[in-house]
Image (tube, rainbow, N blue to C red):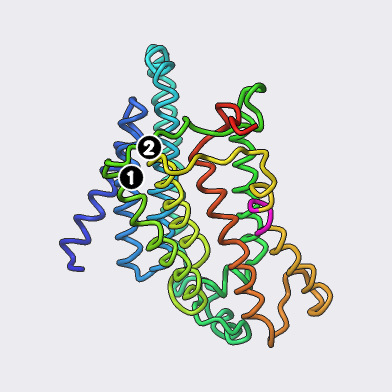
Amino acid sequence: MTVALTLALVGLLMALAIWTVVARDTFAAVTGFVPYGLLLTLAWLQLRAVDVAMTEAAIGAGLTGVLLIAAAARLRSTETPAWAERPGLATRVLAAIVSAAVAAGIGACVLLLPDPAPSLAPAVVENIAATGVGNPITAVLMSFRAMDTLLEAIVLLLGLVGVWSLAPDRFWGGRPGPAPTEDPNSILGYLARVLPPIGIVVGVYILWVGADHPGGKFQGATVLAAMWLLVMMAGLSDAPAVDRRWVRIALAGGPAAFIAVGLLGSVIAGAFLGYPEALAKPLIVVIEAALLPSLAVTLALLLTGPPSRKDASE
């Protein structure tokens, strides 16, 4: 990428970031946030961080953008009264000063780093062969900071529980979202029949190559979740009732398998989430394969929202 294009990308990122912060209309702020995430994906690609770029496009711009759009739609009725509560001049000036001070502090920390900056990269390079994994991102996430990755999966699950807790008591255990209405002649219905088989193959492939190439469970799960959501949006399938046993098993299965492998490591490697060198790669692949369906179900149900109607099949 040329210097001119890089500067243009940085300028657009800054403009969209400022717009997202200063826009008073919630939906307008979200419409700035989504393209900001997509442009940030290009920035990560420019830095040759392909795994981070894929995650940003899938989770940052995609999933988070859809969640914010849904939140903006729910807040429409309360947004107009909130506009009248404009903070006073002193509050705004104080907020601007604090924001500028924080930005200056972060900038100073970055600019004052020693050259070369402190890095654990040499230690990772020295020990990555023991994991048997060719993708350094996967090696770091699943070995050197496996506890963080486990907690991320658990936090997503807790986030879904938080969304479900917003359901009225009379709908608890029911189905999220509106009842499906299928239009067999619609474009959406056609796409929902054609794309999911391709998307499933792509999602599983992204998981499989993630051990040695850019990809992994989060990116693959996002693709699978998108295919499931497409089928539900087209009315070909209804969202599952949240009290179904298979839903609970699918949600908890991935983190449970992660914890089980961690406990196994305590026995055979002397540390929680420790991997014996000969079994490191197979155990990492097992964890990622177990997390794939759990993350896909979690992400899809996060977007469908809390239960809003009773299960008609009961």
Magenta region = 250-254
Q: Could you tell me if residue 22 is visible in this image?
A: yes
Looking at the image, the residue that sits furthest to the left is 4
Q: Quadrant of the N terminus?
A: bottom left
Residue 238: x and y in percent read: 50, 39
In the rendered view, would you say 251 is above or below 115? above
Point 60% across, 41% down: residue:
160
Residue 11: x and y in percent read: 23, 50
77 left or right of 239?
left
Could you say which quadrant of the image residue 87 lies in? top left
Point 60% across, 55% down: residue:
294
| Residue 21 in magenta stretch | no
Q: Which residue was labeled with disc 1? A: 189
In the rendered view, would you say 248 is above or below 197? above
Dominant SS of magenta comes to: helix
Q: Quadrant of the C terminus?
A: top right
Provide the secondary structure element on which disc 1 rests: helix
> In terms of depth relative to the viewer, which is nearer, 155 or 97?
155
Looking at the image, the residue that sits furthest to the right is 267
Q: Which residue was labeled with disc 2? A: 182
Residue 279: x and y in percent read: 69, 83
